[in-house]
Amino acid sequence: QQQQQQQLEAKDVDLLMKGYLLVYLLPGLRPKLTSKRLMERVVRKASDAYFGWTDLLLWVEDLRATIHYEEQHGESPFSQSPETPMNFHSMAHLAGRISEQFGRYQDTECKVMKSALLDLEDDSKNDGRVPLRKFYSSHLEQGGTSNFAESRDYLRHLGALDETDPLRPSVIVPNYLYAPGNCVATSNFISVCCINQCVSLMDTLQAEIAETTAAPENILAIVSSLHSDTVAAPRELPSQLVTRLQEVAGRHQGVVPLHSRLFAQWMHHAFPNECPYPHPAGGLSGDMLMSIEEWNLHRNSTQAHRASE
């Protein structure tokens, strides 16, 4: 009990909090943080391990100041000035608040990433696709410190690579954005991933229809009034989209199944930057997709097995 109340030196608080953040974001680092010396070494390279490390530290400092503001007039045992030396209890309290609120912070980072991808789109197309050459060029222009460095094979595994036009392979924005590689704090129990904005669009649509199927004209009326980060409303849907939805209905006795792959594909074309393009029948489902670390481990294991044959 006495040790838990003992105040920590500022430099130790800083090191412990940075170590906690790294383990929270990248659980695979835990075995490397077995001593203060090793923790210091890993923390020094934190910006290489996690893109946006500096911004994250600023957010944590803001959160600590917010906690102080909320509690300075209360009776909380954790109430301290941000400059006050911390003890075990106040550190644990801050760590708990980080876990609770990190999802909202991560969503801010996701929006920044989405904005960066949209800047790479061809303005004339606005089809939710970034030419692969521009995707990789962006990484190189940032000196190799940005995202957008995944291999072509890994992008294909994610279903984020559109190779319909062999001369213009491209990255599908929402499929890339919602991929496991952009999840953090991944463990056996939780992953913090980019919020799928298509879910809220579908929730609104389904709440209006309140059925599993709907006539195409009803869907068109509702979807034309839905807006997103990149789609203004109300709008007149392109004739090609209208025709495509009517074709889907023609295959299902005049109604559109809202949970079908064809409708998910249609929603992608209606909201190309928000709704992911669905995997083909028989493809991998979302829970079978691998993170980049799992992918590399699987690839190395497969190559080693082939070499031994």
Image (cartoon, helix red, strand yellow):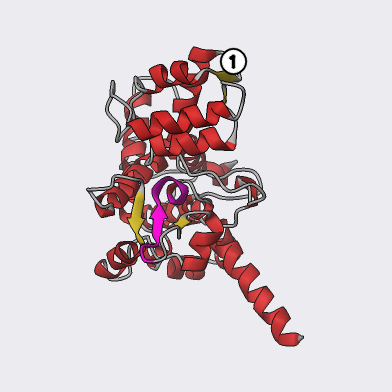
Whether residue 174 is in magenta: the answer is yes
* Viewer-closest of 1 and 139: 139
Answer yes or no: is residue 305 visible: yes
Query: Where residue 170 sits in the image (x, y, percent)?
Result: 39, 58
* Viewer-closest of 220 and 295: 220
Residue found farthest to the right: 309
Query: Where residue 129 sits in the image (x, y, percent)?
Result: 36, 51
Circle 1 residue: 211
Residue 133's place in the image compared with 278, above or below, is: below
Which secondary structure lies at badge 1?
loop
Residue at 45% in and 65% down: 150
Task: Say which quadrant the C terminus sits in.
Answer: bottom right
Answer yes or no: is residue 78 visible: no
Residue 18's place in the image compared with 251, above or below, is: below
* Viewer-closest of 108 and 309: 309
Residue at 46% in and 52% down: 182
Over which residues does the magenta segment extend? 167-176
Q: Which three-letter amino acid code belongs to the residue tagged 1? A: Glu
Name the side, left or right, on which 169 lies relative to 124.
right
